[in-house]
């Protein structure tokens, strides 16, 4: 005996109640009809068994309701319900999160507005700082110009060795009647004294007879006094060099030894004592100067210290 699907259909017919004359109630009712359809396994086309075969009312009950228990439809319906539930859940979830997102957006907008305001304030401060920097730069430039002017006023100009240059400005850092050269001031006296008197007078003025330490200084002095002396042969200037302590041991007034000399010609110093020895002390002091200066500054001569000559005093520049 093969198994199959059995469909059953049971129908109940209405009962009719009749009330008799004596009030008794009688009911007439038909019996329920039952029909059953048995579907054999696939591949078998067995006819259904109908227990009520032959019953005219059972023809209707023998029909199978389409999809009534179709498992495919059941699954589809179930899936539809699940899908609807999911959609509804998502909608509720979105709606529930919407206020939170709106609040966060408002917070972000507030932060953006605040940052924008801060940025504008910073930008305005930056512009003000730029204006201040420009103003400070202009002030710094003005101060630098003033400092440069002061430096020019304080810095002693270096006059050229050409004594005849009238364009050389008068130095501001030497006393009146003194002339500036390379950090020193020189005084060229118009009057004449002995060597010792000349030295005393230079010391009184705050200096001493000049000490010549270089070729450049010698040339400067040689050219300078070359414009001051006259054509008179004895018109010359004392310098601070002497061998009065030991003959031919030449010392400067500060006690230093002579290292570089600028004697005139080939015969000086000659310690000349006169043609007939009338000057037994000889010549122990040095004078210099030739009209217009000399080619290489060689203009020194030793002479008697008791002669009277003009003098060159020297002192350090006060600045
Ligand atoms: Ca001598
Ligand atoms: Ca001499």
Image: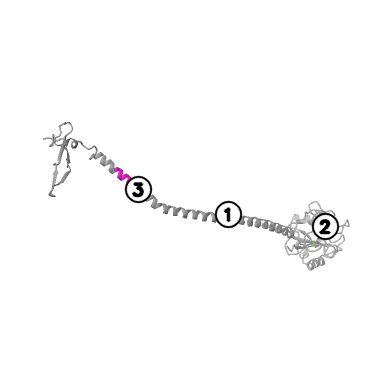
Please tell me which residue lies in front, 108 or 229.
108
Label 2: few (<14), some or many (≥20) within 10 Å? Answer: many
The image position of residue 42, as x and y in percent, is 18, 33
25 vs 300: above or below: above
Residue 82 painted magenta: yes
Q: Nearer the viewer, mark 2 or mark 1?
A: 1
Q: Earlier in the sequence, mark 2 or mark 1?
A: 1
Which residue is located at x 50 percent, y 53 percent? 112
Secondary element at tag 1: helix
From this viewpoint, which residue is outermost toward the left? 1
In the rendered structure, which segment of residues is drawn in magenta? Answer: 79-84
In whole angstroms, how far apart are the C-alphas of marks 3 and 1?
Answer: 51 Å
Residues tagged 3 and 1 counted as in contact (Cβ below 8 A) = no
Q: Which residue is mark 2?
A: 225
Residue 49 picture location, percent across and down? 13, 35
Tell whether 153 sits left or right of 68: right
Q: Residue furthest front?
A: 21
SS of the residue under disc 2: helix
Quadrant of image for the N terminus: top left
The answer to whether one can see residue 261 in this image is: no
Give the CA separation, mark 2 to mark 1: 71 Å
User: Marks 3 and 2, how far apart in space?
Assistant: 120 Å
- 69 vs 273, left or right, is left
Residue position for label 1: 123
- Horizontal relation, residue 79 to residue 146: left or right: left
Question: Could you say which is closer to the camera, residue 89 or residue 101?
Answer: 89
Secondary structure state at the residue bearing disc 3: helix
Write down the quadrant of residue 14 in the picture. Answer: top left
Residue bearing mark 3:
88
The quarter holding residue 303 reads bottom right
């Amino acid at each position: 005996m093969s198994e199959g699907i059995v469909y059953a259909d049971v129908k109940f017919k209405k009962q009719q109640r009749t009330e008799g004359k004596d009030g008794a109630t009688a009911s007439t009712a038909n019996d329920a009809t039952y029909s059953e359809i048995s579907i054999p396994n696939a591949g078998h086309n067995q006819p259904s068994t109908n227990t009520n075969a032959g019953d005219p009312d059972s023809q209707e009950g023998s029909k199978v309701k389409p999809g009534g228990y179709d498992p495919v439809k059941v699954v589809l319906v179930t899936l539809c319900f699940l899908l609807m539930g999911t959609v509804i859940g998502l909608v509720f979830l979105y709606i529930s999160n919407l206020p939170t997102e709106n609040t966060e957006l408002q917070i972000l907008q507030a932060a953006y507005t605040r940052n924008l305001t801060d940025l504008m304030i910073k930008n305005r401060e930056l512009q003000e700082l730029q204006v201040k920097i420009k103003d400070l730069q202009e002030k710094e430039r003005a101060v630098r110009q003033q400092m440069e002017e002061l430096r020019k006023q304080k810095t002693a100009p270096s006059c050229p060795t050409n004594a005849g240059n009238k364009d050389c400005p008068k130095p501001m850092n030497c006393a009146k009647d003194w002339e500036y050269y390379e950090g020193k001031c020189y005084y060229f006296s118009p009057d004449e004294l002995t060597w010792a008197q000349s030295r005393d007078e230079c010391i009184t003025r705050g200096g001493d007879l000049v000490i010549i330490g270089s070729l450049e200084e010698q040339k400067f002095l040689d050219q300078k006094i070359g414009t001051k002396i006259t054509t008179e042969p004895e018109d010359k200037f004392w310098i601070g060099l002497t061998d009065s302590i030991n003959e031919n041991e030449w010392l400067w007034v500060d006690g230093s030894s002579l290292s570089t000399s600028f004697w005139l010609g080939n015969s000086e110093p000659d310690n000349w004592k006169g043609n007939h020895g009338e000057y037994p002390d000889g010549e122990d002091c040095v004078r210099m100067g030739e009209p217009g200066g000399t080619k290489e500054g060689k203009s020194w001569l030793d002479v008697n210290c008791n002669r009277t000559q003009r003098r060159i005093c020297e002192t350090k520049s006060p600045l």
